Amino acid sequence: MTALRDFVCDLLESEGAIVDVVEPGCLDVMAPEALRTRFGWPDLARLGFGAGAQAGSIPIGLEDDWLDRLGALLGERGRSAVLQIALPEGTAPPNDPERLIVRTLELPNAIWRLKAVELGRCNCLLLSFRYTAISDEKRNGIVWLGFNCTTGAVLHDELVAALRRSIDRADGWQAPTPDAIGAVGTVWPADMVAARALPIVERLVRADLEPFVTAMQRRARRDRDRVHAYHEDLRNAAIAKLTGLERAPGPGGKGKKGNEEAAKASEKSAAAIARERLRIAAIEREYAAKLDDLRHNYALAVKVEWVQSLAVIAPVYRHNLLIKRRKGERTIALDWHIAARRMEPAPCDWGESDKRTRIVCDERLHLTPPEGQSPCLGCGKAFCRACRPDTCARCGAPVGARPAAGSRGSQFRTVD
């Protein structure tokens, strides 16, 4: 809770409050009248965070509505920012760049040649998204993703985390210089960022929610089995009783009085049989209603919203590669990030993939994952989805939706 405490401390101080750190888990706050009225605090309020909170303090946590209230106070400040990471002193390029490239890029149908390694800068765009998943329980979380807007690469999770740690360790916030901005250019347009970020966000949220969904499905199966066992016992008992009534021998009698008694007994038996059949139908209706209640209770709704965008101008060693496929050639760049000490993934012209395998197309030398040049479902001819994103070049069959990395559908899963 230290990060949350420091955030609240900085935010309240920016609003004119006097804040004192009393213990690792508490803040004493003398807030202006507007803040006291907004939050319902006394003149001197003690805020508690996590396990270190004292008795009688106002609890501030991630699971209640305080994030929304503090976010409303923050407004749009801090939603977008730009910073520059300085080049560390004594930085040297990687010892064996070709070994790094082999571990990053595999071209089954083409060859590559390293042209040059040069010191440069890149413009990385880091995006954070907050998700809220609501079923029988609630789960909140934040996912981060990143792009290198200079080379077009999608930064993998470890690289994004390493860049964030490097920013946290920096001594201060360094605004980018005009020369640095001119060297790396600007970030992508908003519509291009949205188109590329959407499938990645879905993949990251799915992966982050997997333990939550697994536990939810286990609870749903447990409740479903319990409801099924209860109504199955009721139904079996009613069926057994109905079977006994239907197999019971009819009453016999002699004379007029005996016939009247037999008729009354037959009517009573028919009424009992009809009553048991109605009971079985009622049990089945109740069972179906209980299953509908379970589906409603365990239905999963996920809301994802953008939180922050951070443009980072970072120093890199740029590896310029010449890609050769038959008679065509193409140059791409792979950046080794100095602040993170990691190589970024190879660029991908269609879809997203965290694998190192790329297939080069013949027409425009696009780099795609293997599924980006798979055979057409109509005619069986392989073609490049980056060249023909909508239809097959030979038979005109529709390609279908653009795939999301690691996903198997466009909707979040629900529990049946």
Image (cartoon, helix red, strand yellow):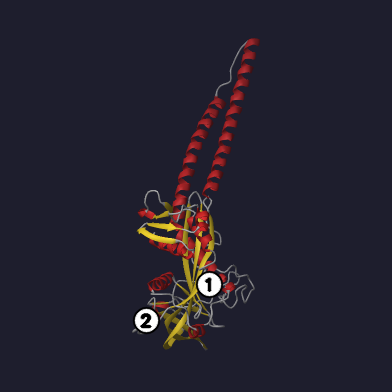
Sort mark 1 into few (<14), some (14-19) or many (20+) by Cα contacts within 10 Å: some
Q: Does 110 appear above or below 251? A: below
Mark 1 residue element: loop
Mark 2 residue element: loop
Tell me which residue sits at (54%, 64%) in the image.
75
Instruction: Kindly identify which residue carries mark 1.
Output: 351
* Distance between mark 1 and mark 2 Cα atoms: 35 Å
Q: Does 347 appear above or below 215? A: below
Q: Position of residue 155 (x, y in %)?
A: 46, 73
Q: Quadrant of residue 158?
A: bottom left
Q: Does 95 appear above or below 20? A: below
Foreground of the two, 233 or 257: 233
Q: Quadrant of the N terminus?
A: bottom left
Instruction: Kindly identify which residue carries mark 2.
Output: 88
Front tag of 1 and 2:
2
Q: Position of residue 129 (x, y in %)?
A: 50, 64
Foreground of the two, 55 or 142: 55
- Checking the image for residue 96, the label placed there is none
Q: Quadrant of residue 3?
A: bottom left
Q: Quadrant of residue 117?
A: bottom left
Q: Position of residue 64 (x, y in %)?
A: 47, 53
Task: Report the amino acid beneath label 1.
Answer: Gly
Q: Are marks 1 and 2 in contact (CB under 8 Å)?
A: no
Foreground of the two, 67 or 413: 67
Q: Position of residue 309 (x, y in %)?
A: 51, 70
Sort mark 2 into few (<14), some (14-19) or many (20+) by Cα contacts within 10 Å: few
Q: Earlier in the sequence, mark 1 or mark 2?
A: 2
Task: Report the amino acid beneath label 2.
Answer: Pro
Question: In this orientation, does residue 22 appear?
Answer: yes
